[in-house]
Image (cartoon, helix red, strand yellow):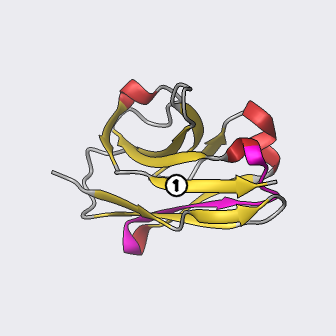
Amino acid sequence: QVVLVESGGGLVQAGGSLKLSCAASRRTFSFSAMGWFRQAPGKEREFVAAIALSGGGTYTGDSNSMKGRFTISIDSTKNTVYLQMNSLKPEDTAVYYCAASAHGIAIVAKLYDYWGQGTQVTVSS
């Protein structure tokens, strides 16, 4: 069993930045990628970004210009994945979830095998 723990969420004004962290309790070679998703009230869970554990290739979602504002990275020595979020907008308000996948970089939530409990990000206007 792998436990993923997110941190770094909070309340920030529009235009501000936050850096989320996701620490995995252990590294397992059955994982090939880790990702971030978010879910706003009344909406479906949305892909944000993912990173390959080998090679570090990344993919960021297209929604709401995330590509120019969100950056995913990894510190393999700490089994920790980060999501740097800049120029935050009120529409970025959501619970952000970290997840681990054995299927490589994937944008579909059902391809992720382990999930964290989520961290709330609230962006005020």
Q: Is residue 65 above or below residue 108?
A: below
Residue 33: quadrant of the picture: top left
Three-letter code for the amino acid on which mark 1 is drawn = Gln
Residue 54 painted magenta? no
Q: Is residue 120 left or right of residue 84?
A: left
Say which quarter of the image contains residue 72.
Answer: bottom right
The residue identified by callout 1 is: 120
Which residue shows up at 67% across the image and 41% down it?
60
Residue 20 in the image: x percent, y percent? 55, 63
Residue depicted at 51% across the width and 30% down the height: 45
Where disc 1 sits, the SS reads strand
**Is 115 positioned to the left or the right of 84 in the image?**
left
Q: Residue at x 57, y 36 (%)?
A: 40
Q: Above or below — where is 40 with respect to 92?
A: above
Q: Is the C terminus in the top left, top right, bottom left or bottom right quadrant?
A: bottom right
Between 87 and 68, the one lying in front of the other is 87
Please state the horizontal and vertical placement of residue 122, each as a whole percent of the image. 64, 55
> In this orientation, does residue 51 appear?
no
- Residue 105 percent location from the top left of the image: 50, 37
The residue sitting at the left extreme is: 1
Q: In the image, is residue 80 part of the stretch drawn in magenta?
A: yes
Q: Is residue 98 left or right of residue 56?
A: left
| Residue 83 visible within the image | yes
Badge 1: how crowded within 10 Å, few (<14), some, or many (20+)?
some
Taking 116 as reference, is 120 left or right? right
Region in magenta:
78-90
Q: How many marks?
A: 1
Query: What x and y, as percent, mark residue 108?
Result: 48, 25
Please identify the residue farthest to the front as the structure is shown: 125
**Residue positioned 73% across, 32% down in the render:** 63
Q: Nearer the viewer, residue 33 or 47?
A: 47
Decide which of 123, 53 is in the foreground and name it: 123
